[in-house]
Image (cartoon, rainbow, N blue to C red):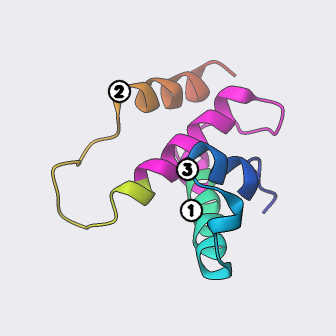
Amino acid sequence: MELIVSIEEAVKYMRYEMDDIDETQADDITNLIMAAQIYLKNAGCVLTKEDEMAKLAVKMLVVHWDENREPIGETNKLAYGLQSLITQLQYCY
């Protein structure tokens, strides 16, 4: 699967520095990017490298999943802004 968001873009959006990311963390972030793309595709979204909204949705999902790793917690719904992006990606193309 071709990634529409590079690991460097994701790390920058996560407010980390690439120099601070080890190989295991890089693999985890890459897996989060792939999972976000699959999640959005399964939701009916059209994803292209040229679509900044699609890239933003992927980055927002990566951050959301990185910050909410626990299976149980207070964050059981996606942020409104992310849900709005997903809806637009589903129906605007």
Residue 59: horizontal and vertical position, in percent? Answer: 59, 44
Q: Secondary structure at mark 3?
A: helix
- Amino acid type indicated by mark 1: Leu
**Vertical placement of 73 versus 81: above or below?**
below
- Amino acid type indicated by mark 2: Tyr
| Badge number at residue 32 | 1
Q: Residue at x 26, y 67 (%)?
A: 70
- Amino acid type indicated by mark 3: Asn
Q: Nearer the viewer, residue 66 or 53?
A: 66
Q: As drawn, is 53 to the left or to the right of 75?
A: right
Residue 9: horizontal and vertical position, in percent? Answer: 72, 47
Q: Secondary structure at mark 1?
A: helix
Q: Residue at x 64, y 61 (%)?
A: 34
Residue 83: horizontal and vertical position, in percent? Answer: 42, 30
Q: Which residues are magenta?
A: 38-64
| Badge number at residue 80 | 2
Q: Secondary structure at mark 2?
A: helix
Q: Measure the alpha-carbon separation of dots 2 and 3.
A: 19 Å
- Label whose residue precedes the other's in the sequence (2 or 3): 3
| Badge number at residue 42 | 3
Check if mark 2's residue and mark 3's residue have beta carbons within 8 Å: no
User: Mark 1 packing: few (<14 Cα in 10 Å), some, or many (20+)?
Assistant: many
Q: Nearer the viewer, residue 23 or 31?
A: 23
Work out which quarter of the rendered image holds the C terminus and state it.
top right
User: Mark 3 packing: few (<14 Cα in 10 Å), some, or many (20+)?
Assistant: few
Q: As drawn, is 55 to the left or to the right of 79?
A: right
- Label whose residue precedes the other's in the sequence (2 or 1): 1
